Image (cartoon, rainbow, N blue to C red):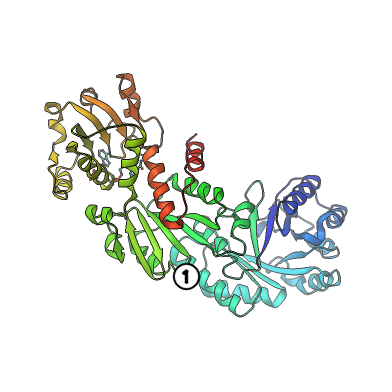
Amino acid sequence: MTKIAAVIVASNARDAERDARAALSGGADLAELRLDQLDSLNSSVVRSLSAAVGPRAIATLRSPSQGGGASMTNRNDLMRDIAAQRFAYIDIELEADGARAEELTKAAKRHRTGVIASHHFAKPADLSDVQDALESCSAIGDVAKVAVPVATIESVIQLVDLMRSRASRKARTVVIGTGIPGTMTRALADDCGQEIQYASWGRSVVAGQLTLAAAKRLRGRTPIVLGIVGHPIGHSLSPAIHEAALAALDLPGVYLPFDVERDSLDALLQSADRLRIRGLNVTIPHKESIVERLDELDGDAERLGAVNTVLIGDGWTKGHNTDVFGFRLSLRSLGLRVGDRAALVVGAGGAARAVVDVLLREGAKVQVASRNVKRSESLAEAFDQPVEVVPMEKLARSGPWDLLVNATPVGAQGFSDGLPVPESILAKAGFVYDLVYNPPTTRLVAEAKRLGKPTTSGLEMLLHQAAKSFELWTGRAPPIEAMRRAAKEALS
Ligand SMILES: NC(=O)c1ccc[n+]([C@@H]2O[C@H](COP(=O)([O-])OP(=O)(O)OC[C@H]3O[C@@H](n4cnc5c(N)ncnc54)[C@H](OP(=O)(O)O)[C@@H]3O)[C@@H](O)[C@H]2O)c1
């Protein structure tokens, strides 16, 4: 089984020892002491750390050229000091320590210290270079460790295949894709027979590193990889919500952001089994283009021609649209009755379709206005029941409405903070529902409140659609309160 090493980053030896002991009693198998991060390091500090936690510690003195701490004039001497003490492992770098590797390895062996030979690429590298680095590391150490930044899903897939092929040869290996896209290599560490999983303790050192708690949940269990696919992903709340749900139910899962352009969508779907991906959320701009790539659609996704959730089985994919469920349930939880009432939906994209679908089924009279009349018309044509298309400039002569729904990104973080409709139109609305949830109070919601109108943000819908997706992927009742808490925390 993969050993979990909690990465200990502290500025003094006392804190390093305290944190290492805490991580070990908190379930880590090893503590990686990042000795290069200590303010002052000398042979007596090395001796005392070895005496305190050495048999369960990896001693790492990362050189500055490999992403280590402040430059050390006496790094060679310190490495000799470390090799002369008992640790579970010493980390020897291919470049900085290559010339002294034999001497260091011999000294380490005398103290029954294992040797991790490592190389950290500063930039994304060709697979053949990664393989070469691993072979060179294997020639020096008991464990070969290579970390390389990854930016694309294709390079993640290559690394995962490499991890599996090394494990099948019983080569003791750690391959890490660094950066957020590389989180997949960490999530699959155990599944791919990696020797060590480096997990964060307290302050994370490297983007994409799993927390000790997440690494423990995954250890020895088949991983459930979930995620959101879109481009750009931006500041989605979904990772926080789903990670909280996985943790609350102690499931061996991770929820990853897949920032994937249209050209790479097929590569992701085709590799889903190899990557242990069981479910995906789909967001802008793939909600519609993913439809034709799936084996099956549920009723809502088929009717709307848009998918926000993909369920992945053995070589088989099914698309769902849980936005429909989310909006319907949010109306219930808000106590909003829309049957026979007049509703104006602003926007004509995927979310607007889900909203219109629910409103029509509940018996509302629906008007749609968007900046693109053709898109509004094609939305209206998708439904059997009548949907009236109103050009934006003619809204002044329409209304009033019992319900106004903003289904545009206007007001969302990163978009314009304007109003999706002029204030004079807002004045003719009863309840104002903004699908935007970040920020929690958009200008639309603030203006509506000022006019004395009841309002809601899109948070309830977001939570209910997320809960439904989670249930589809895991077959478990979603822990909605934990999910709500995580969303609110992420928004605060
Ligand atoms: N709360 C939830 O659970 C939930 C669920 C789904 C979506 N949403 C939110 O709903 C919003 C729409 O999502 P979507 O998936 O429907 O997106 P979409 O498919 O891209 O559609 C966006 C709609 O808004 C219009 N629009 C975009 N920018 C605009 C602007 N600056 N001014 C006026 N209109 C603009 C678009 O018009 P064009 O066609 O002319 O571009 C289109 O009609 C997003 O903010 C999303 O985060 C929330």
Vertical side of 373 occupied by 157: above or below: below
Q: Nearer the viewer, residue 345 or 108?
A: 345
Vertical side of 438 occupied by 431: above or below: above
Q: Position of residue 300 (x, y in %)?
A: 27, 53
* Label 1 CB sits under 8 Å from any ligand 1 atom: no
Q: Determine which residue is flagged by label 1.
A: 274
Quadrant containing the N terminus is bottom right
Who's the residue at 60% across and 66% down the image? 190
Q: Position of residue 329 (x, y in %)?
A: 34, 41
Asked if residue 211 shows in the view, the reply is no
- The quadrant of the rendered image in which ligand 1 is seen is top left
Which amino acid type corresponds to the residue marked 1 in the rendered image?
Arg
Q: Position of residue 262 (x, y in %)?
A: 33, 60
Q: Position of residue 36 (x, y in %)?
A: 73, 54
Q: Nearer the viewer, residue 71 or 143?
A: 143
**Label 1: few (<14), some or many (≥20) within 10 Å?**
few
Q: Is residue 416 left or right of residue 114?
A: left
For label 1, the SS is loop
Q: Nearer the viewer, residue 435 or 118?
A: 435
Vertical side of 179 occupied by 267: above or below: below
Q: Nearer the viewer, residue 250 or 106?
A: 250
Vertical side of 79 occupied by 164: above or below: below
